[in-house]
């Protein structure tokens, strides 16, 4: 099977990169996230995390329900700094 | 096979087709609804109470052929577009149609079977598209008797295509 | 300083579940704010040009777009409801406040109760060249076509024979697009057979037990190589065949959008039958966070009629907890639950029922894929 397919469109990560990393021993999503930026793009992991979880399960004999998911911190989508601090300074 | 291809088998069809005697009496609805889904608008559409009230909304519709007059009210009520009216003596079939352009009365169009194959030419004899049908037109076609139980869709456009 | 808004009830998501939740609560005089990401209310209903199934008393036979219009109008007529469109809920914080980005500003909303009706996102699928322009999600195609009047392409391969795949195929045909085939990995069609039959009789083949091996094309989709699967969903080498197309549409499932629920520390459970991680809740849709309810696809993937009923139940309960009691609450809640039970009662609802049986009870907490964060 050709492993040159995209797992994470936001960060352009291929299945091969993901599988190589799992084979190296990166078997949690948090580790993979830190190494590859998987799940850190605009969609915040909505697309890729489940696919990556499935690959971990396949390669390490785990079950989907046992995979620890990375945390979901606010803000949920990308926002401008000005939204947070800029214009609001003028408001009472 | 219906579950694999989307094409009902002859056994499926037999379970919803009235006997020859009833067909010869005149127009009658054929409800090609084969799985138990939560849906009941057909019951409310029938002015003759020929479609049995649903005890469980997931039941398949049951049609009392003796009460059905073939009025066709149910055709556009079915969200699954699964109801047809066959008028065996007059070689007519009424079917739901949600494509544009609508055909015109007198048009010769292709009759398609349940697999989408063009099997014969048919003549459009009625086009009903009242507001109450909410954009589901009911087209009545005339066709050869042997295709009455086969044709379930039409293809509007050039016959040579 | 960030502006703080106080309200009785905050509804996050203005789709079918959120709209009915807001209406039910507002009719009992609760003050409601709806936060909706899109520029109008309706959610997925705004793309559903087909007639709905279900019970006639719950709008069966009506087209989704008309249900959305009706509910939107009702909401606009309610002075108790304030709608923020193009507004995105961004986070839930320990002090029970939700932040929202709205009109380029950050707002804080403090509500006595919150109903999370954020819906779902589409699942992706792995195959070669899956990043080629011309590969779309079914939701994107519906948005382009049914909201903006833009055709995605001329020849489409649909992947997935669930209701979404079948319905979007039909809508593509109505828009004059050629649907080359519907590909389904399972050995049977997952959606309603009447939907399958209605596209099949226009001539669209449905290949069950098949998958997409690769998208073909250099700079955009020129077709796809499809392949047969064995009973374990493994590709059978040698069965590849090429289908020419300029668009591949993926309708391979949805996943509940639950980030806010996780931030709010609601106990979750992983339930494949409901599309992924969903919050544990009681029969009134109350989560393990006393302030928070859930409704619609965020509670588990189902269809819009169920979402609307869930919204109503949650809206009613939230309003009475805030203090807007009315005599009919008990009877009305009972009726709604009865309707929901009827809807899920048949063979089609089996999967949902199995899924729902897992969202209650302590045993399941151990399947919480987020519990290590708590």
Image (tube, rainbow, N blue to C red):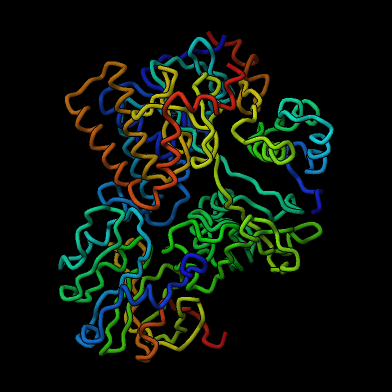
Residue B71 point in image, percent of width and height: 22, 74
Q: Quadrant of residue B105?
A: bottom left
The quadrant the N terminus of chain C occupies is top right
**Horizontally, is C124 left or right of C285 in the view?**
right
Q: Quadrant of residue B49?
A: bottom left
Of residues B110 and A88, the one nearer the viewer is B110
Q: Residue at x 46, y 80 (%)?
A: B112
**Horizontally, is C144 left or right of B88 in the view?**
right
Q: Is residue C30 above or below residue C120?
A: above
Residue A22 point in image, percent of width and height: 79, 35
Q: Looking at the image, can residue C102 be seen?
A: no
Q: Residue at x 73, y 60 (%)?
A: C221
Q: Is residue A92 above or below residue C55?
A: above
Residue C224 point in image, percent of width and height: 71, 63
Q: Is residue A2 above or below residue C286?
A: below
The quadrant the C terminus of chain C occupies is top right
Counting the numbered discs, the total is: 0
Q: Residue at x 27, y 37 (%)?
A: C336
Residue C309 point in image, percent of width and height: 33, 38
Q: Quadrant of residue C194?
A: bottom left
Of residues A72 and B77, the one nearer the viewer is A72
Q: Is residue C64 above or below residue C181?
A: above
Q: Looking at the image, can residue C277 be seen?
A: yes
Q: Residue at x 82, y 43 (%)?
A: A16
């Amino acid at each position: 099977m050709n492993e040159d397919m995209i797992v994470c469109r936001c960060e352009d990560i291929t299945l091969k990169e993901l599988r190589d990393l799992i084979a190296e021993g990166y078997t949690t999503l948090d580790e993979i996230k830190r190494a590859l930026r998987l799940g850190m793009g605009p969609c915040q992991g909505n697309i890729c995390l489940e696919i990556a979880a499935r690959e971990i399960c396949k390669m390490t004999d785990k079950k989907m329900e046992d995979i620890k998911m990375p945390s979901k911190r606010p803000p949920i989508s990308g926002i401008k700094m000005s939204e947070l601090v800029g214009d609001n300074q003028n408001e009472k | 096979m219906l579950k694999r291809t989307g094409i009902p088998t002859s056994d499926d069809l037999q379970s919803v087709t009235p006997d020859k005697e009833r067909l010869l009496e005149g127009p009658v609805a054929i409800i090609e609804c084969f799985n138990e889904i939560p849906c009941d608008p057909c019951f409310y559409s029938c002015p003759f109470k020929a479609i049995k009230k649903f005890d469980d909304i997931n039941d398949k519709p049951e049609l009392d052929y003796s009460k059905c007059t073939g009025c066709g009210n149910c055709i556009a009520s079915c969200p699954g577009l699964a109801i047809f009216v066959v008028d065996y003596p007059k070689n007519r079939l009424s079917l739901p149609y949600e494509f544009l352009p609508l055909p015109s009365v007198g048009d010769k169009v292709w009759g398609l079977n349940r697999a989408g194959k063009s099997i014969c030419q048919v003549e459009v004899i009625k086009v009903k598209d009242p507001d109450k049908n909410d954009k589901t037109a009911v087209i009545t076609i005339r066709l050869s008797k042997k295709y009455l139980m086969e044709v379930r869709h039409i293809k509007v456009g050039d016959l040579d295509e | 300083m960030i502006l703080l808004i106080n309200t009785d009830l905050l509804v996050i998501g203005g789709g079918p579940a959120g709209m009915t939740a807001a209406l039910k609560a507002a009719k009992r005089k609760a003050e409601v704010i709806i936060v909706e990401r899109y520029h109008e209310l309706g959610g997925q209903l705004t793309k559903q040009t087909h007639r709905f199934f279900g019970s006639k008393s719950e709008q069966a036979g009506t087209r989704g777009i008309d249900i959305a219009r009706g509910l939107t109008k009702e909401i606009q007529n309610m002075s108790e409801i304030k709608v923020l469109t193009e507004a995105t809920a961004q986070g839930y914080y320990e002090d029970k406040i939700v932040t929202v980005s709205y009109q380029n500003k950050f707002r804080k909303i403090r509500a006595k109760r919150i109903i999370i009706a954020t819906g779902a996102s589409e699942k992706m699928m792995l195959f070669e060249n899956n990043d080629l322009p011309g590969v779309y999600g079914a939701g994107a195609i519906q948005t382009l076509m049914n909201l903006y009047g833009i055709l995605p392409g001329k020849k489409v391969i649909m992947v997935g024979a669930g209701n979404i795949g079948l319905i979007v195929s039909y809508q593509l045909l109505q828009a004059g697009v050629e649907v080359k085939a519907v590909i389904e990995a399972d050995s049977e069609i997952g959606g309603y057979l009447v939907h399958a039959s209605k596209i099949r009789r226009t001539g669209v083949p449905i290949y069950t037990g098949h998958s997409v091996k690769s998208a073909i094309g250099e700079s955009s989709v020129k077709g796809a190589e499809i392949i047969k699967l064995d009973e374990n969903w493994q590709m059978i080498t040698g069965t590849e065949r090429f289908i020419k197309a300029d668009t591949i549409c993926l309708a391979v499932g949805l996943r509940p959008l639950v980030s806010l629920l996780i931030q709010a520390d609601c106990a979750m459970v992983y339930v494949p039958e409901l599309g992924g991680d969903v919050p544990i809740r009681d029969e009134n849709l109350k989560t393990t966070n006393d302030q928070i309810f859930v409704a619609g696809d965020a509670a588990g993937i189902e269809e819009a009629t169920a979402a609307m009923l869930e919204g109503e139940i949650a809206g009613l309960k939230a309003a009475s907890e805030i203090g807007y009691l009315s005599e009919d609450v008990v009877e009305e809640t009972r009726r709604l639950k009865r309707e929901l039970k009827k809807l899920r009662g048949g063979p089609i609802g089996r999967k949902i029922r199995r899924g729902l049986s897992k969202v209650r009870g302590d045993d399941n907490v151990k399947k919480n894929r987020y519990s290590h964060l708590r």
